[in-house]
């Protein structure tokens, strides 16, 4: 997999994808600078021989529907924090399934997102990967929640317990740098 971080113009992304072709990579992720530019992304997908993965930076099911309708993505990657939460992510995963595209939840925003993404990945029939930064599991993620997913030989195991099966540690809300907001809804 090649993470291109939405940094490249169409010509640069095309050239990078062409150079990656002999490596038979699993995908080129978020190759162009504006991942909501569906026309350019679809053009890149037709021109490149590497699978295109898009896009952890998009929000809402409509943006993902547009990608799928245009044939702009081989793999759907979504971030629960940015796409609209777990309910919207389930709808996006259903769209991916309807278009016979694999889905790969993404996490770089915190342990609660990671755990919710794991639940989504276990729910979505076409889920293939759960992207996670392993170092965070061994460092600051464990300082925020009661339980993290277990990893065994590259596999993440289902959480055990009700709901998300984790909670913020009580001391997190008491930290000086914590901003606590409560909803009465």
Image: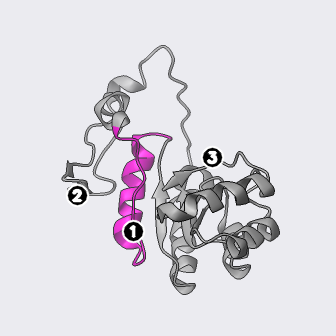
The residue closer to the viewer here, 86 or 37, is: 37
Q: Quadrant of residue 43?
A: bottom right
Which label number is shown at residue 157?
2
Does 112 appear in magenta? yes
Q: What stretch of residues is rendered in magenta?
A: 109-134
Secondary structure found at label 1: loop
Query: Depth-wise, is mark 3 or mark 2 nearer the camera?
Result: 3
Which label number is shown at residue 128?
1
Residue 153 screen position, x and y as percent? 18, 53
Contact? badges 3 and 1 (CB < 8 Å) = no
Q: Please say which color scheme the image uses.
A: one colour
Residue 184 screen position, x and y as percent? 55, 44
Residue 130 screen position, x and y as percent? 40, 57
Q: Quadrant of residue 61?
A: bottom right
The residue closer to the viewer here, 41 or 104, is: 41
Q: Which residue is mark 3?
A: 5
- Is 87 displayed left or right of 133 in the figure? right
Secondary structure found at label 3: loop
Q: Quadrant of residue 169?
A: top left
- Is 179 displayed left or right of 10 in the figure? left
Q: CA distance from mark 3 to mark 2?
A: 28 Å
The residue closer to the viewer here, 27 or 120, is: 27
Say few, some or many: other residues with alpha carbon within 10 Å of mark 3 (under 14 / 14 to 19 / 20 or more).
some
Question: What residue is drawn where x is 54% and y is 70%?
Answer: 75
Question: What residue is drawn where x is 71% and y is 76%?
Answer: 46
């Amino acid at each position: 997999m090649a993470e291109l971080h939405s940094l490249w113009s169409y010509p640069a992304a095309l050239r990078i994808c062409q150079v990656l072709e002999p490596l038979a990579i699993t995908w080129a992720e978020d190759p162009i600078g504006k991942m909501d530019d569906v026309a350019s992304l679809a053009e890149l997908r037709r021109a490149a021989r590497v699978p295109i993965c898009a896009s952890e930076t998009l929000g809402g099911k409509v943006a993902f529907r547009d990608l799928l309708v245009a044939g702009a993505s081989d793999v759907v990657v979504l971030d629960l924090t940015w796409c609209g939460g777990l309910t919207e992510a389930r709808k996006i995963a259903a769209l991916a399934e309807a278009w016979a595209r694999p889905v790969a939840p993404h996490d770089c925003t915190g342990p609660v997102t990671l755990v919710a993404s794991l639940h989504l990945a276990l729910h979505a029939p076409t889920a293939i990967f759960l992207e996670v930064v392993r170092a965070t599991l061994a460092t600051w993620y464990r300082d925020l929640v009661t339980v993290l997913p277990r990893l065994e030989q590259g596999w993440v195991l289902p959480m055990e317990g009700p709901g998300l099966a984790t909670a913020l540690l009580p001391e997190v809300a008491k930290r000086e740098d914590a901003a606590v907001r409560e909803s009465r809804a």
